[in-house]
Image: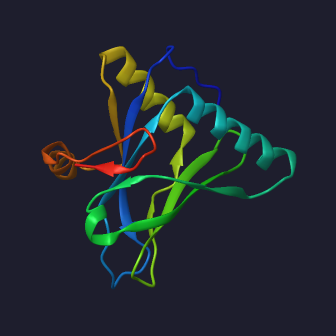
Amino acid sequence: MKMQLPEGKKITVYLSAFTLNDYEEGPRYTWFYLDQAWLERAQSLLDIVKKHSLAHVTVEVNLCWHNNEEYRMGCEDLSIGGESGDERFWFIGYPKHANHSVGTYRISFRKLAKAITEAIQEGKDEVFIDVDEKLIEVIRGCNVKCDEEQECIS
Protein backbone atom coordinates (compact mmCIF):
# COMPACT_ATOMS: atom_id res chain seq x y z
CA MET A 1 0.00 0.00 0.00
CA LYS A 2 2.65 2.52 -0.94
CA MET A 3 0.91 5.76 -1.92
CA GLN A 4 2.40 9.20 -2.24
CA LEU A 5 0.39 12.41 -2.44
CA PRO A 6 1.70 15.63 -3.93
CA GLU A 7 3.21 17.79 -1.20
CA GLY A 8 0.58 19.58 0.86
CA LYS A 9 -2.31 17.77 -0.86
CA LYS A 10 -5.36 16.96 1.28
CA ILE A 11 -8.35 15.04 -0.06
CA THR A 12 -11.73 14.66 1.60
CA VAL A 13 -12.78 11.01 1.53
CA TYR A 14 -16.51 10.25 1.90
CA LEU A 15 -17.69 6.76 2.85
CA SER A 16 -21.19 5.30 3.25
CA ALA A 17 -22.08 4.44 6.83
CA PHE A 18 -24.71 2.14 8.28
CA THR A 19 -25.82 0.88 11.66
CA LEU A 20 -24.56 -2.54 12.63
CA ASN A 21 -28.00 -3.27 14.08
CA ASP A 22 -30.86 -3.48 11.59
CA TYR A 23 -33.34 -1.89 14.01
CA GLU A 24 -31.45 1.29 14.86
CA GLU A 25 -30.76 4.57 13.09
CA GLY A 26 -27.49 6.34 12.55
CA PRO A 27 -25.48 8.55 10.22
CA ARG A 28 -25.63 7.71 6.51
CA TYR A 29 -22.05 8.68 5.79
CA THR A 30 -18.76 9.76 7.31
CA TRP A 31 -15.76 11.62 5.99
CA PHE A 32 -12.17 12.31 6.85
CA TYR A 33 -9.25 14.28 5.48
CA LEU A 34 -6.61 12.15 3.84
CA ASP A 35 -3.11 13.58 3.60
CA GLN A 36 0.38 12.12 3.49
CA ALA A 37 0.48 11.81 7.29
CA TRP A 38 -2.72 9.70 7.21
CA LEU A 39 -1.21 7.43 4.56
CA GLU A 40 2.01 7.03 6.54
CA ARG A 41 0.08 6.17 9.71
CA ALA A 42 -1.99 3.61 7.79
CA GLN A 43 1.19 2.07 6.40
CA SER A 44 2.76 1.83 9.86
CA LEU A 45 -0.38 0.09 11.15
CA LEU A 46 -0.27 -2.34 8.22
CA ASP A 47 3.38 -3.03 9.05
CA ILE A 48 2.34 -3.96 12.61
CA VAL A 49 -0.35 -6.30 11.29
CA LYS A 50 2.13 -8.08 9.02
CA LYS A 51 4.99 -8.20 11.52
CA HIS A 52 2.85 -9.80 14.23
CA SER A 53 0.56 -11.87 11.94
CA LEU A 54 -2.56 -10.09 13.20
CA ALA A 55 -5.97 -10.04 11.54
CA HIS A 56 -6.18 -6.28 12.06
CA VAL A 57 -5.29 -3.43 14.41
CA THR A 58 -7.64 -0.78 15.70
CA VAL A 59 -6.82 2.76 16.82
CA GLU A 60 -8.99 5.63 17.98
CA VAL A 61 -9.53 8.47 15.52
CA ASN A 62 -11.76 11.51 15.04
CA LEU A 63 -14.21 11.50 12.15
CA CYS A 64 -16.96 13.69 10.84
CA TRP A 65 -20.37 12.05 10.60
CA HIS A 66 -23.62 12.94 8.85
CA ASN A 67 -26.12 14.27 11.43
CA ASN A 68 -23.45 14.40 14.11
CA GLU A 69 -25.54 16.87 16.14
CA GLU A 70 -28.30 14.28 16.40
CA TYR A 71 -26.21 11.16 17.02
CA ARG A 72 -23.27 12.74 18.86
CA MET A 73 -20.85 10.13 17.60
CA GLY A 74 -17.86 9.28 19.71
CA CYS A 75 -15.15 6.70 20.33
CA GLU A 76 -14.52 6.29 16.63
CA ASP A 77 -12.15 3.53 15.63
CA LEU A 78 -10.07 2.98 12.50
CA SER A 79 -9.29 -0.67 11.82
CA ILE A 80 -6.70 -1.77 9.30
CA GLY A 81 -5.94 -5.33 8.28
CA GLY A 82 -6.07 -7.97 5.62
CA GLU A 83 -3.68 -10.21 3.83
CA SER A 84 -0.90 -8.93 1.61
CA GLY A 85 -2.40 -7.55 -1.58
CA ASP A 86 -5.87 -7.30 -0.03
CA GLU A 87 -5.27 -4.76 2.75
CA ARG A 88 -8.38 -2.91 3.88
CA PHE A 89 -9.53 -0.26 6.33
CA TRP A 90 -12.86 0.53 7.97
CA PHE A 91 -14.33 2.75 10.64
CA ILE A 92 -16.71 2.13 13.52
CA GLY A 93 -18.26 4.79 15.74
CA TYR A 94 -20.71 4.81 18.59
CA PRO A 95 -23.67 7.19 19.04
CA LYS A 96 -23.49 8.74 22.50
CA HIS A 97 -26.93 7.72 23.80
CA ALA A 98 -27.38 4.37 22.07
CA ASN A 99 -26.45 0.73 22.47
CA HIS A 100 -25.35 0.11 18.90
CA SER A 101 -22.52 1.04 16.58
CA VAL A 102 -22.23 2.57 13.14
CA GLY A 103 -19.66 1.44 10.60
CA THR A 104 -18.38 1.70 7.07
CA TYR A 105 -17.71 -1.00 4.55
CA ARG A 106 -14.21 -2.46 4.46
CA ILE A 107 -12.40 -0.44 1.82
CA SER A 108 -9.45 -1.92 -0.02
CA PHE A 109 -6.37 0.24 -0.24
CA ARG A 110 -6.30 -0.56 -3.97
CA LYS A 111 -9.74 1.04 -4.33
CA LEU A 112 -8.59 4.02 -2.25
CA ALA A 113 -5.42 4.42 -4.35
CA LYS A 114 -7.44 4.31 -7.58
CA ALA A 115 -9.91 6.92 -6.31
CA ILE A 116 -7.13 9.20 -5.05
CA THR A 117 -5.15 8.89 -8.29
CA GLU A 118 -8.22 9.78 -10.37
CA ALA A 119 -9.04 12.73 -8.10
CA ILE A 120 -5.51 14.12 -8.41
CA GLN A 121 -5.51 13.67 -12.20
CA GLU A 122 -8.88 15.44 -12.45
CA GLY A 123 -7.89 18.23 -10.04
CA LYS A 124 -10.50 17.24 -7.44
CA ASP A 125 -10.18 17.52 -3.67
CA GLU A 126 -12.81 14.93 -2.75
CA VAL A 127 -13.56 11.28 -3.43
CA PHE A 128 -16.62 9.15 -2.81
CA ILE A 129 -16.02 5.49 -2.09
CA ASP A 130 -19.00 3.09 -1.95
CA VAL A 131 -21.37 6.07 -1.96
CA ASP A 132 -24.34 5.95 -4.33
CA GLU A 133 -25.31 8.90 -6.54
CA LYS A 134 -28.35 9.88 -4.45
CA LEU A 135 -26.23 10.09 -1.31
CA ILE A 136 -23.59 12.12 -3.16
CA GLU A 137 -26.32 14.67 -3.94
CA VAL A 138 -27.24 14.78 -0.23
CA ILE A 139 -23.60 15.22 0.76
CA ARG A 140 -23.04 18.03 -1.72
CA GLY A 141 -26.16 19.76 -0.42
CA CYS A 142 -24.88 19.87 3.18
CA ASN A 143 -22.90 22.79 4.57
CA VAL A 144 -21.14 20.89 7.35
CA LYS A 145 -17.36 20.73 7.30
CA CYS A 146 -14.69 19.72 9.79
CA ASP A 147 -11.87 21.70 11.30
CA GLU A 148 -8.29 20.41 11.30
CA GLU A 149 -8.96 18.10 14.29
CA GLN A 150 -11.87 16.51 12.45
CA GLU A 151 -14.37 18.24 14.72
CA CYS A 152 -17.58 19.05 12.88
CA ILE A 153 -18.43 22.70 12.35
CA SER A 154 -21.30 24.33 10.49
Q: Measured from the top left, where is residue 113 in percent x and y?
A: 50, 30
Q: Measured from the top left, where is residue 100 in percent x and y?
A: 45, 80
User: In this picture, is 142 found above or below 44?
Assistant: below
Name the image colouring: rainbow
* Residue closest to the far right: 52
| Residue drawn where x is 65% and y is 26% of the image | 2
| Residue drawn where x is 52% and y is 54% of the image | 106
Number of numbered discs present?
Answer: 0
User: In this picture, is 130 found above or below 127?
Assistant: below
| Residue drawn where x is 31% and y is 16% of the image | 123
Front-most of 16 and 140? 140
| Residue drawn where x is 16% and y is 48% of the image | 142
Residue 37: quadrant of the picture: top right
Residue 65: quadrant of the picture: bottom left
Could you tell whether 41 is left or right of 95 in the image?
A: right
Q: Measured from the top left, where is residue 28 in percent x and y?
A: 29, 61
Residue 77: quadrant of the picture: bottom right
Classify the position of the N terminus by image quarter: top right
Q: Measured from the top left, where is residue 11 in percent x and y?
A: 40, 30
